Amino acid sequence: MGHGRRAIPSNRAEVSDFNGEDMQWYQGSIVTDRDVLVREALIDFGDGHILHISMRADDPQALARQQRDVLALPLPRQKFTRGN
């Protein structure tokens, strides 16, 4: 690419079903520990409140367990809107 621009890889990771809506997980990183798996998500409730979820795991199985725990949270369904 010309003019000093370079492609930035997407940090989108998994998509989960949360209260009937798609919830996008984003891949993060920790500079001092490249082996740790990092995921983040935002849930916008549409009333001025946003929930930021951040998690770390040492292996894919632990990450999947943590994501399942988040998806089981009893958050108000009627206020949930997808955060982009």
Image (cartoon, grey):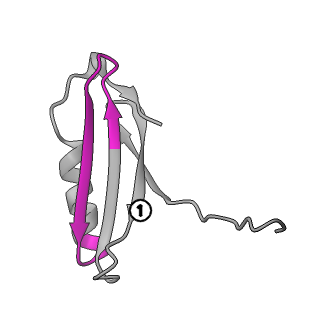
What residue is at 33 percent from the left and 60 percent from the top? 39
Image location (x, y in percent) of residue 31 = 34, 78
Position in image of residue 26 (x %, y %): 42, 55
Residue drawn at x 32%, y 24% as measured from the top left: 80
Q: Which residues are magenta?
A: 42-61
Q: Taking 28 as reference, is 24 above or below it?
A: above
Question: Which residue lies most toward the left here?
Answer: 74
Q: Is residue 1 left or right of residue 72?
A: right
Quarter-of-image position of residue 28: bottom left
Picture coordinates of residue 33 (x, y %)?
28, 82
What residue is shown at x 29% (from left), y 16% (from top)?
A: 47
Residue 39 sits above or below residue 17 on the image: below
The N terminus: image quadrant:
bottom right
**Residue at the farthest right position:** 2
Q: How packed is label 1: few (under 14 Cα within 10 Å), some, or many (20 or more)? A: some
Q: Image quarter for residue 81?
A: top left
Judged from the image, the secondary structure of the residue bearing numbered disc 1 is strand
Q: Is residue 51 shown in magenta?
A: yes
**Residue 35: percent from the left, percent from the top?**
32, 83
Whether 8 is drawn above or below 41: the answer is below
Q: Which sits in the foreground, 53 or 16?
A: 53
Most foreground residue, 36 or 7: 7
Please check the rendered image and state whether residue 49 is part of the magenta-colored stretch, yes or no: yes
Determine the residue located farthest toward the front in the rendered image.
Answer: 3
- The amino acid type found where label 1 is placed reads Gln
Marks counted in the figure total: 1
* Residue labelled with disc 1: 27
Question: Is residue 24 found left or right of 49 in the rendered image?
Answer: right
- Residue 59, by quadrant, is bottom left
Give the residue at x 31% y 72%: 37
